[in-house]
Image: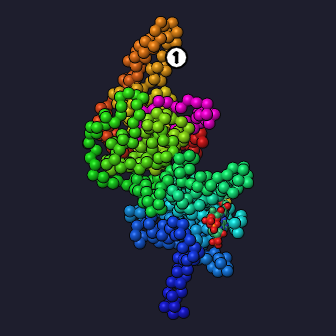
Amino acid sequence: MSMEQQLERLAQLKQRAALGGGQSRIDRQHAQGKLTARERIALLLDNGSFNELDALAVERGGDDGEALYGDAVVTGWGSVDGRTVYVFAFDFTVFGGSLGAVVADKITKTMDLAVRNGAPLIGLNDSGGARIQEGVGSLGGYGDIFLRNIYASGVVPQISLIMGPCAGGAAYSPALTDFIFMVDGSSQMFITGPDVIASATGETTTADDLGGAMTHAAKSGVAHFAIKGEQTCIEEVRRLLSFLPANNLETPPYVDTGDTVDRRIDDILSVVPEIATMPYDVRDVIERVIDNGDFLEVHAAFAQNIVVGFGRIGGHSVGLVGNQPMYLGGVLDIDASRKAARFVRFCDAFNIPLVTLVDVPGYLPGVSQEWGGIITHGAKLVYAYAEATVPKVTVITRKGYGGAYVAMGSKHLGADVNYAWPAALIAVMDGPSAVRIINRRELNAADDVEATRAKLAADYKERFEHPYIAAAKGYVDDVIDPRDTRIKVARALAMLRNKSQILPARKHGSVPL
Ligand code: HXC
């Protein structure tokens, strides 16, 4: 064959690979409002930066037994904002994006490259799960991927996009990654679908109700983001990457945000009401503290009583955790503890300092919480904060009561710099609750119970409910003017930039999972 013929043959093979399962299936994908694997990769990566691997890996057994070049996944590497990432995108036009040996081999090769070379791994999922015709070979393929997900955990960021149905094994690999983005309206995740559920338990449900984006973003917490439209979803992934380092040995990239750190936040006093029970949106505080108010909230629809997400202070990435008084009074419950604990551990794994804003009435009392294991789940948050060795800066803005005071990045759990605002209420519990317990006899004997209760609560507030006992003991390092919060936090983070803390050697801790 002449070189010309050789090139012609190569072009034909590449052309076949690019067509995946054929034009009619591509048309069907588009008709469902979904993009193809290659179109998605093109949106995710910088223009022209994609280098495909294994486009010519071959699976026999397409229509009429013809060879399927590339099989049901497109893999390779490219860049996002000039930084290398590894990517695999399931091709639903080939056997419904189902996973057999060739698909698994292509994905595991990409994963190995990502870990060996220390760059994020991004999976675009749209898959019918295990390829039924391949039997146990396909189950094994999933196992090979899971193993690598776990070995990569805490080494390189792993991000999953769910852009179509993800059944069975196709749901578990994303579950082992750090962040799950679901396209609202066109993606579902479930272990068993509606038909299997109907025959197993008699429950009737739809695919979307069972495992759609909002179900997982708000109810189960499986998804961190539910975003309408594939393009917007992919843009948010690019934004998330901008806050993250390439791997656990690097620090996140510095970004010149143009926002000075010596900026007072004068209007902060009008954001947080003085009356401790009055709600406000903690995001209004977060957005004033970080550069240009640029906040990427994670898990926004799940456990809304706590807010977590990424921002920058002085151009450096930070992970922010704040109780949300606007929702359930900002109380800590099972879901809030799980959500925040997971976020804190991610930040710690990837060298992202933690800034915590505390305004918490306590852990949520209730039979369902106790039976649901609030003790174990609440302990996760305590564990995560204590284990984190990244710089930790905490500001108590209003309430810091009980066990929740300890859990929320307190000095006792190893926070580096702790501040309180002057109106902070740091105590075992609030005044009315406290006097009910410690002044029961006086209240029982009182002629005017209400007046006595009010007086006792006022005395308690004077004696216990302020930041100065904590300041006297060094549990807060300073009581600060709220308007200086951004300046003080930025200076603390700058002071901590070279922090190095090594915990006692061990195989790993035993997190109360
Ligand atoms: C082989 C599959 C397939 C699969 C779909 N296809 N799923 N081929 N193995 N698992 C093929 C179909 O035959 C069809 O081929 C094409 O993909 C598109 O599928 P449709 O059903 O026409 O598409 P749609 O109506 O959009 O429905 C998509 C779907 C459905 C919801 C994903 O196909 C489905 O329920 N599939 C099975 C899901 C499942 O139970 N998977 C196994 C899970 S168990 P043609 O030729 O017509 O285009 C599992 C265990 C892993 O994953 C455990 C790991 C430890």
Residue 405 can be seen in this image: no
Image coordinates of residue 475 in percent, x first then y, are 41, 28
Image-based side of 402 in relation to 469, left or right:
right
- State the residue at coordinates (47%, 24%): 429
**Residue at which label 1 appears:** 437
Q: Nearer the viewer, residue 333 or 52?
A: 333
Q: Identify residue type, mark 1.
A: Ile
Q: Residue at x 36, y 31 (%)?
A: 273
- Horizontal and vertical percent for residue 352? 42, 47
Q: Which residues are magenta?
A: 354-383
Q: Quadrant of the C terminus?
A: top right
Q: Secondary structure at mark 1?
A: helix
What residue is rendered at 52% in x and 16% in y?
A: 437
**312 sits left or right of 401 in the view:** left
**Ligand 1 picture quarter:** bottom right
Residue 405 pos. (x, y %): 46, 30
Q: Quadrant of residue 484?
A: top left
Up/down of 319 relative to 457, above or below = below
Q: Nearer the viewer, residue 152 or 159?
A: 159
- Percent position of residue 82, x then y: 38, 64
